[in-house]
Image (tube, helix red, strand yellow):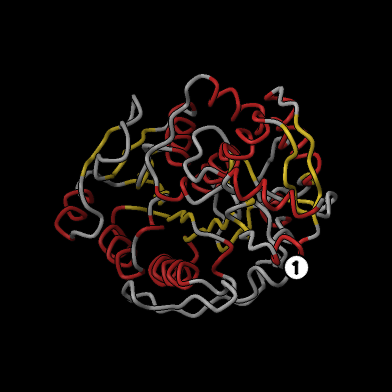
Amino acid sequence: MRILLIGGTWFLGKYIAEGALARGWSVTTFNRGRSGRDVDGVQPVHGDRTARRDLERLAQQGPWDAVIDTSSSDFAPRDVLLATTTLHTAVRRWVHISTVSVYQGWPHEPLTERSALLDCPADADESVGYTGPDGSPTHYGFQKAGGERAVTDVFGDAAVLVRPGVILGPGEYVGRLPWWLGRAKRGGRILAPAPAQQRIQPVDVRDVAAFALEQAASETSGGYNVAHPQGMTFEDFIGECLAVTGGAGRPVWVDPAFLTEQGVKQWTELPLWRTHAGVWAVDSSRAVAAGLRTRPLAETIRDTWAWLAADGRPVDHPRWAAHGIAPEKEAKVLAALD
């Protein structure tokens, strides 16, 4: 099988490239050659996905059985549309890595693939969309919804839309799990968002990669929510972080209203914490039926710590610095409880 991977040098794209090669597939990657090294064994083509001339040059390297696009997050819908229309004659199907943020109800409502989507045209530029006063919907969600439309308008029943929630694992560049692991290693009293039994649904990057490859090789179509069907409790999550790092810490479970009163930011200062009812209520049963297999999150935590302990270095990304509460602020909030 011959696939074209747009991206392919770090995190999800890197795992997809490695997984495809392990299956004996022929892999062409297309990227700017700036964010990381091309995986050994791929056929790299360097260029700008917003430049028609570069895309036309890329199309001459085809045909391919499928495209897997991992790099649309930083591009407007019209850029996705340019890629789909230019490459349409060179590929048979398009697997698009999207996000649950495309839903109107995210993160307030439980989600299935039948949930309503945000409205954004396929030819929208980067200005289309907005972020609501409570942080939802997001400009990012509108842009990704437009990107999905740019794929389905061109590829129709040959389009697959993979919609992950939170992706964790070795090589993570956002910094959510690495921050919790570092905090656990530091020990002491750890500020933790109650309730301790809240279940979370992050999914391992390697499982997302495997699912994307399965869809590239299948005849499926449409959207798939990709979240861990079992998940784990926040208590078990922090407990596992403490166990793998050997940290002598103790979580202090604090009511969300008090955290908000103290100015603790959801989603960033305490990564993975968000009080909205739908944030961890994503139905992934359709993806499971289509082949999604998810490893225990304890394995994800363990392997990410092993990667970090072996001097794992993510790509430089601004989102890393946005995650984690400052020690001084955490101490101040904990002191306010006494």
> Measuring 43% from the left and 72% from the top, which residue is drawn there?
146
Which of the two residues, 305 or 210, is positioned nearer the viewer here? 305
Q: Quadrant of residue 225?
A: bottom right
Q: Position of residue 180 (x, y in %)?
A: 64, 39
According to the picture, the residue beneath numbered tag 1 turns out to be 277
Q: Position of residue 322 (x, y in %)?
A: 49, 51
Q: Amino acid at mark 1?
A: Ala
Instruction: Tell me if mark 1 has few (under 14), some (14-19) or many (20+) residues whose alpha carbon lies within 10 angstroms of its own.
Output: few
Q: Quadrant of residue 306?
A: top right
> Measuring 37% from the left and 44% from the top, which residue is drawn there?
5
Q: Position of residue 245 (x, y in %)?
A: 67, 25
Quarter of the N terminus within the rendering? top left
Hey, which residue is sitting farthest left in the picture? Answer: 53
- In the displayed structure, 107 sits above or below 286; it is below
Q: Secondary structure at mark 1?
A: loop
> Measuring 63% from the left and 53% from the top, which residue is drawn there?
226
